[in-house]
Amino acid sequence: QFQLVESWGGLVQAVDSLRLSCAASGRTFNNYVLGWFRQAPGKGREFVSAINWSGGSAYYADSLKGRFTISRDNAKNTVYMQMNSLKPDDTAVYYCAARLVARNNYDYWGQGTQVTVSS
C-alpha cells in the first residue's frame, strides 16, 4: 500500500505564502508521478500541479502558473507545494496523489489538508 500524508495546511491571510508537504511510504517513490489537487467548498476536485519521477518536469493548472511551485525530494520521499500570493479563492482542501509513470489515473490519495485564505 502506498500511503500519502499531507501536512502544513492552515489559515493564512491573502498574499501570504504556505508550503505544503506530502510524505510517502510503502512503495518505491521514484516510480511515481506525484500530483496536487484541490477541492473548494461546493466545487469539484481540480488539478493543481504534477511533477515527474525525477523532478525534471512540472505541470500546472494555467490559472496557478507563477504562484505555485511543485518540487520533490526523492531521498526524503516527499513532495512539496510552495504557494505564494495566496488568494481567498485558493481556499480548499489540498490532496496529494500518486500514479505510476505508465498509468494515466492517480491510484493513491492522501487524506487532504485544509488551506483557508482570509481576505
Image: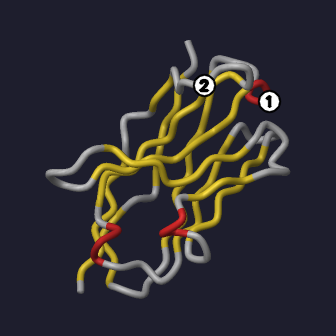
- Extreme front residue here? 62
Residue at 49%, 78% (x, y): give it.
Answer: 17
Q: CA distance from mark 1 to mark 2?
A: 16 Å
Q: Position of residue 112 (x, y in %)?
A: 37, 42
Label located before the other in sequence (1 or 2): 1
For label 2, the SS is loop
Q: Which residue is mark 1?
A: 30
Asked if residue 13 is positioned above or below residue 107 in the image, the reply reads: below
Residue at 32%, 51% (x, y): give it.
Answer: 93
**Front of the two marks 1 and 2:** 2
Q: Amino acid at mark 1?
A: Asn
Q: Nearer the viewer, residue 119 or 18?
A: 119
Q: Which residue is mark 2?
A: 104
Callout 2: few (<14), some (14-19), or many (20+) C-alpha neighbours within 10 Å? few
Q: Position of residue 94 (x, y in %)?
A: 39, 50
The reply, left or right, for residue 31 in relation to residue 114 is right
